[in-house]
Image: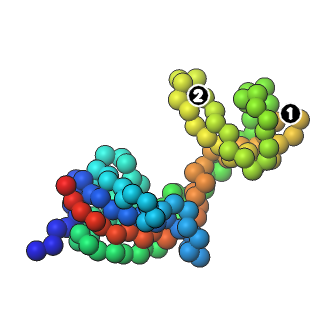
Amino acid sequence: MSQIVAADSLVTLHYRIALPNGQPLLSTFEATPATLKLGAGEMLPAIERIIVGLPVGGHHVFELAAGDAFGPHRPELVERVRREHMPSQEIEAMSIMEFTAPDGSRYSGLVREIDEASALVDFNHPLAGKPIRLEVEIIGLA
């Protein structure tokens, strides 16, 4: 009898996240499979919902709408940051910058454009607003 992924499973799997045209963005198929505890916040909730109920040994491909993957692109997460509030490193358009919040936590933003006074920084996930193709192979449960 086949084992089935449950909502609290410790699951070992290969996964590939790609754009709808097949361009791969992240994959474990060419490397060590991932072992993740469902319900522990290690995966996107939408991906967890998809793999619950899949059998061990199963290989599946899913298309996720933008809202079900990394969420919608939120305009309020794009903001202008004055140069004096930015790290002193060399800054280029279309580069990722890391910022430190007052509480010490760190977060990244994509510099969309920059001038002498400020930069337009997008703090959305790079895949926000984009549909994705998810391929999973369930290897085992612990």
Q: Residue at x 60, y 49 (%)?
A: 124
Categorize mark 1 by other alpha carbons within 10 Å: few (<14), some (14-19), many (20+).
Answer: few
- Amino acid type at image mark 2: Ala
- Residue 107 is drawn in which quadrant? top right
Closer to the camera in the image, 45 or 142: 142
Q: Residue at x 72, y 29 (%)?
A: 87
Real-space Cα separation, disc 2 to disc 1, in angstroms: 21 Å
Secondary structure beneath disc 2? loop
Question: Is 105 above or below relative to 48?
Answer: above
Q: Which mark is residue 101?
A: 2
The residue wearing badge 1 is 117
Closer to the camera in the image, 32 or 123: 32
Q: Residue furthest left?
A: 1
Q: Residue at x 46, y 73 (%)?
A: 63
Circle nearer the N terminus (2, 1): 2
Categorize mark 2 by other alpha carbons within 10 Å: few (<14), some (14-19), many (20+).
Answer: few
Q: Residue at x 79, y 44 (%)?
A: 92
Closer to the camera in the image, 76 or 89: 89
Residue 120 drawn at (x, y percent): 76, 43
In the picture, measured across the screen, residue 136 lies left or right of residue 128, that is left
Question: Is 9 above or below relative to 97?
Answer: below
